Image (cartoon, helix red, strand yellow):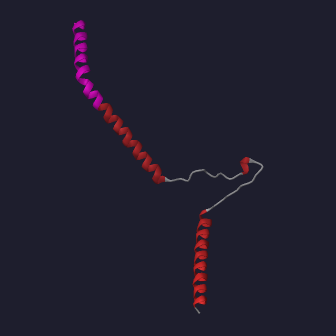
């Protein structure tokens, strides 16, 4: 009786294992998609873009690009202000000298 019980448990374990493998293979097969187009004329083939259209990703990239551009503008403004200490007085002196020469 114990031998039969062990065999039943062993068979049940094998069945469960095979069912798990079957389920895994079914799920894997559902994910796999292969499309093949055969034609002697390239223009007769349907257009299939290589990448799908993902507006959410495009939006995120656009926002990141905008933030990067604004950072660049802010960096440029800071550099202009810092070096303005040097070139603003020089510019004022040049304008003053030009006005004196016109008179």
Q: Measuring 57% from the left and 84% from the top, which residue is drawn there?
A: 9
Quadrant showing the N terminus: bottom right
Residue 84 magenta-highlighted: yes
Quadrant showing the C terminus: top left
Q: Nearer the viewer, residue 60 or 20?
A: 20
**Residue 19 in the image: above or below residue 45:** below
Q: Position of residue 80 (x, y in %)?
A: 29, 27
Disc tally is: 0
Q: Measuring 60% from the left and 88% from the top, which residue is drawn there?
A: 3
* Residue 92 location, quadrant: top left
**Residue 89 in the image: above or below residue 25:** above
**Residue 73 in the image: above or below residue 8:** above
Q: Measuring 38% from the left and 40% from the top, which residue is drawn there?
A: 68
Q: Main secondary structure of the magenta part?
A: helix
Q: Position of residue 69 (x, y in %)?
A: 38, 38
Residue found at the very far right of the displayed protein: 40
**Residue 9 in the image: above or below residue 58:** below
Q: Nearer the viewer, residue 67 or 91?
A: 67
Q: Measuring 24% from the left and 14% from the top, which residue is drawn there?
A: 95
Residue found at the very far bottom of the displayed protein: 1
Residue 88 magenta-highlighted: yes
Region of the chain picked out in magenta, as a range: 78-103
* Residue 97 location, quadrant: top left
Q: Position of residue 53 (x, y in %)?
A: 53, 53
């Amino acid at each position: 009786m114990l031998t039969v019980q062990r065999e039943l448990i062993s068979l049940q374990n094998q069945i469960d294992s095979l069912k798990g493998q079957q389920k895994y293979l079914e799920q894997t097969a559902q994910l796999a998609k292969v499309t093949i187009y055969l034609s002697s004329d390239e223009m007769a083939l349907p257009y299939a873009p290589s990448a799908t259209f993902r507006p959410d990703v495009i939006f995120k990239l656009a926002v990141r690009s905008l933030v990067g551009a604004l950072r660049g503008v802010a960096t440029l403004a800071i550099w202009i202000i810092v070096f303005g200490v040097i070139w603003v007085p020089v510019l004022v002196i040049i304008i003053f000298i030009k006005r004196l020469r016109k008179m």
